[in-house]
Amino acid sequence: MQLNKDELLHLSQGRGLTVIAGPTAVGKGTVVRYILEHNPEVALSVSATTRSPRPGEIDGESYFFWTMDEFDANIAAGEMLEFATVHGTNKYGTPKQPVIDAIAAGKLVLLEIDIQGARQVKAAMPEAKLVFIAPPSWNELVRRLQSRGTETPEEQARRLKSAEVELAAQSEFDHVVINDEVARCASEVLDLMKAN
Ligand code: 5GP
């Protein structure tokens, strides 16, 4: 019998699936890269987005960079595990097929997505673990965003507004991990991913 994608995901119930979320510039990407470099059994889901690539970002590795039409066609075809409009502008989402393939290959799968997406995954797959990465303080978060220097002041302001909302949602998560130091934070997240 051939199962369709939703049936396959439903069968896994989210076992082996960990969602990492947290406010802009908290350093999620750095923590995730650290985990991937040190743990070959972990696979990161590559998201799709309608935003433009930043310098150095590679299509198919950093994100799948899709037009709005491509993104909407994938939603209509039922190919997205979750999707959301983030920071009021662009669509971001998780294509289903690579997640199914990685779970089938026995990998621990990480999704680095926003809070709206995290809620959708938890609703569809209650066994999925939701981990919130929090900054040591609000001032430190602002400092990290400003020192990154990749967004215009208007974009920074928009992201900080989203960050306030995101920080308020951390109680919805199964675990909160403070990103005070990358290796320590990564090790705590990995322990949570491996725990039954
Ligand atoms: P950035 O533009 O800085 O790469 O990402 C902006 C936001 O989009 C981040 O908060 C990130 O967590 C979120 N994001 C990235 N990929 C996905 C995804 O596949 N789904 C959802 N819902 N959010 C995503």
Image (spheres, rainbow, N blue to C red):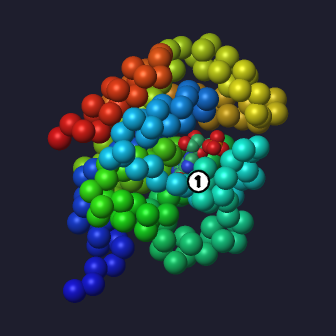
**Above-or-below relation of 93 to 26:** below
Quarter that holds the C terminus: top left
SS class, disc 1: loop
Going by the numbered disc 1, the residue's amino acid type is Glu
Residue at 40% in and 60% down:
99
Residue 4 in the image, given as x and y percentages of width and height = 33, 78
Q: Quadrant of residue 192?
A: top left
Q: Which residue is mark 1?
A: 61
Q: Quadrant of residue 147?
A: top right
Residue 1 in the image, given as x and y percentages of width and height = 22, 86
User: Does residue 13 appear left or right of residue 189 in this picture?
Assistant: left
Q: Residue furthest bottom?
A: 1
Residue at 27% in and 31% down:
191
**Above-or-below relation of 24 to 14:** above
Name the one closer to the observer, 106 or 28. Answer: 106
Q: Confirm whether residue 176 shows in the render.
A: no
Residue at 54% in and 36% down:
29
**Above-or-below relation of 45 to 36:** below
Residue 44 in the image, given as x and y percentages of width and height = 45, 49
Q: Confirm whether residue 156 shows in the render.
A: yes
Under 8 Å from ligand 1: the CB of mark 1? no
Q: Which class describes the residues within 10 Å of circle 1: few (<14), some (14-19), or many (20+)?
A: few
Residue at 47% in and 74% down:
78
Residue 134 in the image, given as x and y percentages of width and height = 47, 24
